[in-house]
Image (spheres, rainbow, N blue to C red):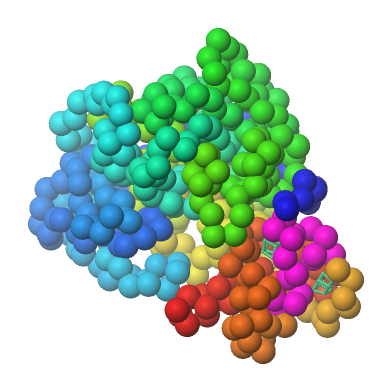
Amino acid sequence: MLKLNGLKLLHFKNSQDAQTVDIPLPKTVKIPMQQHMGAPCTPTVKVGDQVRVGQLIGDSDQPFSVPVHCSVSGTVTALEDYVTSGGLPAKRVVVETDGLQTPVECSPHTVTNQAELVEAARNAGLAGLGGAGFPTHIKLGYKDVDRLDTLVINAAECEPYITSDYREMMEYPDDIIEGIQAVMKCLNIGRAYIGIEDNKPAAIALLNQKAAGTSIRVEALRSIYPQGAEKVIIYNTTGRIVEEGELPADKGVVVMNVTTVANLSRYLRTGMPLTHKRVTVDGNFVEKPMNVRVPIGTSVEDLLNFAGIDRERVKKALMGGPMMGLAMENLDTPIIKNNNAIVLFDEAEAEAPHTTACIRCGRCIDVCPMNLMPANLEKAFDAGDKEELERLKVGLCINCGSCTYVCPAKRNLAQKHQLAKAMLRRKK
Ligand code: SF4
Ligand code: SF4
């Protein structure tokens, strides 16, 4: 049973009124072939090729994968090896831009059934843009389609600092509604909920106005972390519980991120696949928080230069928010599809906390939205006890970071749980 309580965090939505601005075209982009959950793509271009915006540059014959498209026009100058944040080897395509941004030829798509919708989502290069990177065409291609009756749009954006989805709602509400209607029509789904945390009243009002007269309902959700976790938002919008080992679709629900559904709508209208991403740039010392639209493959370094960040003060840079974001080793890292924020901290916030012994206070258990026992999981991981990790259901951990956040002993629990899951995957 899921709990309704969670963490009350300071929101730091400093960039919420920052209208999206476009970064000047970078000289070079490095476009990774692994920007999604699943098999990496193989480059379909070679060094010396001229490429256009929206051109397919990477694909895979594995069903659980998402094609990659070029975000700029120019010349392919290298096919580099790199290691993903998950530690896997993959390639990235380096393109020197020509400044013209010549697009591929593309035309609108009409979709009327599930097969056409799935094909469109794949051709659009869509993977969960809220951070998960789950291939959208797999989600929409659930084979027992008659079981589906509800679409949940995840617009909670519960992580502090991040306002990328919020700007999508404020700037492109019609795209969101049209995308939802396309999915509902093709999957024969009768109702949709847009779940938005109640700290975004302007977005709630705007989408309520846009959804008037449709079977789309806007649900104002409590601003409690992690409201945007898939199982949590399903429960809080529909009352349905997705059990261990089940997919949301097994409970009749499809969940899509709000920016993903808007991009689906834009693809249907224009035929142009996903090439750019909006990224929030903020942090504890950032004077001018921004939302910046960048060509995918733009380096974080270029983004920070554009945002006027004093690099000397950056002591910690996260891809994502402070609860679930990944710390970057270097700023040469390219922005990928599911990056929604770069959050920066100076010395005052970046210092690693001093860890002490567990005092068995139980706070980590109280806040866990999945009803796990984080302290016991840590103990099992430290002992290398795989059977105990399975018994304690480490696989249910959604890596929300709530246990780490509340721990008075400053134990890095969530990170250990991630390592524990990786250990079990290796075992299998
Ligand atoms: S990181 Fe995992 S164990 Fe910790 S609170 Fe979140 S779901 Fe529970
Ligand atoms: S919150 Fe920290 S100190 Fe308290 S039981 Fe959990 S691991 Fe131990």
Quadrant of the rendered image holding ligand 2: bottom right
| Magenta span contains residue 377 | yes
Q: Residue 131 appears at what percent x and percent y?
A: 51, 51
Residue at image coords 41%, 58%: 37
Q: Which of 378 and 188 is in front in this view?
A: 188
Q: Residue 239 appears at what percent x and percent y?
A: 68, 38
| Residue 192 left/right relative to 370 | left
Residue at image coords 10%, 53%: 49
| Res 237 seen here | yes
Q: Residue 126 appears at what percent x and percent y?
A: 36, 43
Residue at image coords 29%, 59%: 33
| Res 317 seen here | no
Residue ranking furthest to the top: 213
Number of callouts: 0
Residue at image coords 83%, 60%: 366
Vertical side of 376 occupied by 209: above or below = above
Q: Give the range drawn in magenta.
A: 363-378
Q: Nearer the viewer, residue 410 or 14?
A: 410
Q: Residue 44 appears at what percent x and percent y?
A: 15, 56
Vertical side of 129 occupied by 188: above or below = above
Magenta stretch, main secondary structure class:
helix
| Magenta span contains residue 348 | no
Vertical side of 155 occupied by 81: above or below = below
Q: Which of 229 and 26 is in front in this view?
A: 229
Q: Quadrant of residue 146?
A: top left
| Quadrant position of the C terminus in the picture | bottom left
